[in-house]
Amino acid sequence: MSRALPNDPEALRLVAKIANDPLMVYATFKAGKGGMSPGQRRAHMAQGVNRIVMAGNQVGKTRLICAEIWWQGLGWHPYRPITRTHGKAWCVIKDFESGYPEFCAKMHEVEPPNVLHPSCTWSEASGYSFIEKGKRHTWLVFKDGYQVQFKSGTQDAKSLESGTVDAIFFDEPPKPGHWAAGRMRVSVGNGPTLIGFTAVNAPLGWLKKEVEGDPESGMAPAEVWEKIIIVLSMKDSPHRTPEDIEAQKKKAAAQGQTEQRINGGWEGLTIGRRFQAFGDRHIKSLRWMLDTYKIDQFRIGADWGEGGGKTAIYVEGIVGTKAPYTYLVLGEYVSKETTTPAMDAAEFVKLLKAIGIPATAIRRARGDVNSAGKLGMGQSCNTAFELAVAKELGVRVCPFKFEVPNKTKGSVEFGHGEISHAQMEDRFFVSEDCKSLIQSFYHFVDEEALKHALDGCRYGLDDTFGPKKNHSFTAAAMNALNA
């Protein structure tokens, strides 16, 4: 049964005014009829200074951020107080060059009428522009002069290093440095932060630690965050059809990304990553690996570097006496800061004890020479580590001797191809405790920060991959292998 419109002319004018204001429609209409969904409403009603919205794909995450930006600029919010002390707010967009016009198009969809400065305009090709003294700025400027300035989350971070703003909004996580610089701008007035994202195409361990802390080290989050999760469902996506949602769920499941793309979970995968076959089925408990397989060789692979995350040592097991082998990565040690061989040795011995094998069980050890990196010119990290392990164990001679891994031209790509093939055939398993290696498999394209874990892992196994020769194995060949 439909309701008749009121006869009162004033009431009719009010109804028409709301209907012609996309932002008011979003704030007041029913979900699925142009109004906010229950999930969007939860995000808007949350009262925390810092809000994080983790969402499945196509649930209206960007629209809710756009609405928040408009309310900040207008100085009015249906559920929260708004502060406009400093005359401006920021919105940080991850992929600014290609993403700014697209984001502005979504802003324009909920733009209220007659609120912008005469010199502030929108176009489909270039987004919002404010012209001042002949210069174009990527700003929203309101009639009263209030500004919302759009910034890049991946380009030069210097643009985020100065100024004070009332609030900051992030559409998708930026680089960690951009995040830290941007959030400093709201610290003076304890201004609000809102970030919304779907956890795909980037490693987000750094953000998870900031929001939730680090249970392993006992580190609590430095600030309180209110987390809102919006799952892809008919309840939270009433603007979509059941058939459409079901099709997206099947596609996400086929990609191994249900947790991120449907449930709004933390761990995502990088599109175009090198190790396409690696997935949750390759992550096992240490007990499962030791109970399931008879290990024929225990090995060590090590990559030496100076600084946090740059020294990576792996204890590995090889199953079988001839190819094709099954590979087990039993444990990892990754430096948290700049370390010495003695510090590395102490942590390595602890790792062996946790796995439950003696140092004398190590059949082979392979590590990067690094004669001029971590220790300086003319010193071998391999030799220094052997001496430090011997001292830590209280013996005269280290039970294992390091060899130099294959570093000929093309050996990296060849090794990655061998590991990827083993993962395709379910002959490569990683302990759930190897957090750095798992992150690298999920996200590595060519990032330097993710190479150290992969190199350490590969070094310990590379003599089983094939004869030592000049491997002319191209990136194109790797992509073909992973296709």
Image: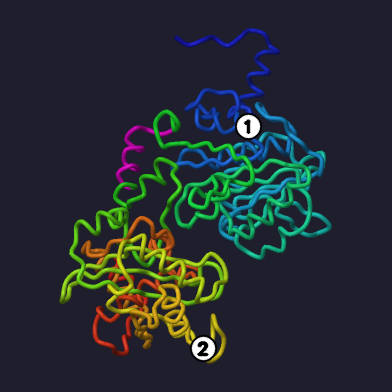
Say which residue appears at 81% left-offset and 55% top-offset: 132
Which residue position is annotated with label 1? 23
Q: Is 31 left, or right, of 162 in this rendering?
A: left
Q: Nearer the viewer, residue 447 or 15?
A: 447
Q: Position of residue 302 (x, y in %)?
A: 41, 75
Amino acid on which disc 1 is placed:
Leu
Of all residues, the one furthest to the top in this rendering is 7
Q: Please tell me whether residue 274 is drawn above or below residue 110 in the rendered image.
A: below
Q: Position of residue 382 (x, y in %)?
A: 43, 83
Q: Is 399 left, or right, of 77 in this rendering?
A: left
Mark sitting earlier along the chain (2/1): 1
Say which residue appears at 73% left-offset and 59% top-offset: 161
Of all residues, the one furthest to the bottom in this rendering is 378
Amino acid on which disc 2 is placed:
Gln
How far separated are the C-alphas under marks 2 and 1?
66 Å
Q: Nearer the viewer, mark 2 or mark 1?
A: 2
Q: Please tell me whether residue 85 is drawn above or below residue 33 in the rendered image.
A: below
Q: Position of residue 105 (x, y in %)?
A: 58, 46
Q: How packed is label 2: few (under 14 Cα within 10 Å), some, or many (20 or more)?
A: some
Q: Nearer the viewer, residue 469 or 429?
A: 429
- As drawn, the label of residue 379 is 2
Q: Which residues are magenta?
A: 239-251
Q: Nearer the viewer, residue 232 or 275?
A: 275
Q: Position of residue 413 (x, y in %)?
A: 35, 78
Q: Nearer the viewer, residue 23 or 317?
A: 317
